[in-house]
Amino acid sequence: MSLKIGISPIAWQNDDLPDLTAAYTMEQALKEAREIGYTGVERGQRMPSDTEGLRAYLEGNDIALCGGWCSGASLVNDFVAEREAVREQVEQFVALNSPCIVYAECSNTVQGQAGTPVNNRPRLTKDEVLAYAAKITELAKWMADQGMPMAYHHHMGTVIETEDDVNWLMEGSGPEVKLCFDTGHLLFGGGDVMATLNRWGDRVHHVHFKDIRPAIVQDVKENDRSFLDAVVAGAFTVPGDGCIDFQAVANTLKSMGYDGWIVVEAEQDPAKAPPYEYSKKGYEHILDVCGQAGLEVQA
């Protein structure tokens, strides 16, 4: 059993806060990520949008596509409308052998609203989440039929944020709805990282290794700051630089037989956390915990 280590280019090229990373280029992100040892990268908005252009871009940097964000709107779209909205990305990701699409509900998210406290994110009742889960199961089945798994991303500021939200989503959806298990977002949302991983390990298809700085997270919550405020303040960081026990996560992934991608996603102010230095720190921490867990990493 072996897995691969990828990274989101968000440390060098922040899609939500482009001014924060204006001194960096996407080319630098891919070059440095590959130098560190990462073998895959999730798609960023500043990469070529057409399939063959993106293929050439990735191949030119000797790096694979290991997923990418999809802004879903299944709460407001019917199945046909949502299917057509995501069709182009599904076809592109199939053509480029991506392991999944990282899908999140963004029709009413507050994650990109600088003036809205993340505490004020939209909330659904259990029954509403169960109904939503049934709805996206139809979309996930269609994606699977095209050859592209849906890995659902629980994310701060969205309707699926807390441990309860994740539990309800998984309970109400079919097995076609996989989980993008994100350690940082789960803990930021007050969830139990290990309990959730142990409960839904059979649904985990994609893993984000994201650490948090708990004092900053506490300040964001207590003082009604926005998700973007949290990013700038440094709520997130690379694995090994915060409070999450990634050795425990790696040990459980080993016991599960996980052989997918581990992806570092750690957006923060590059003036405080230089992307190369921190991305290297995260990569080395992953190698360490995987090695101790007996997980083989593909070079």
Image: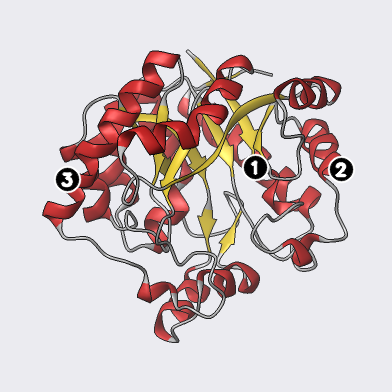
Q: In terms of depth relative to the viewer, which is nearer, 227 or 198?
A: 227
Residue 223 position (above or below residue 45): below
Write the residue at 41% across / 30% down. Answer: 150
Q: Is residue 43 above or below residue 132?
A: above
Nearest to N terminus: mark 3 or mark 2: 2
Name the residue nearer the viewer: 282 or 158.
158
The residue where tag 3 is placed is 131
Circle nearer the N terminus (1, 2): 1
What residue is drawn where x is 28% and y is 44%? 196
Task: Check the image and name the residue furthest to the left.
Answer: 127
Position of 260 compared to 33: left or right? left
Residue under the point 55% across and 17% down: 94
Tell me which amino acid carries mark 3: Ala
Query: Residue placed at 77% from the left, 53% from the top?
Result: 275
Numbered tag placed on residue 28 in the rendering:
2
- Residue 138: image quadrant is top left
Crowd tier of the residue under label 1, counting other residues whose Cα lies within 10 Å: few below 14, some 14–19, many 20 or above: many
Kind of residue indicated by mark 1: Ser
Can you give x and y, in whole percent of width and height, for residue 222 in the image? 40, 84
Residue 156's place in the image compared with 138, above or below, is below
Does 272 sit left or right of 168 as displayed?
A: right
Across the whole image, how many numbered discs are drawn on residues? 3
Residue 174 spot, x, y in % from top left: 21, 28
- Placement of 188 over or under 220, stated as above or below: above
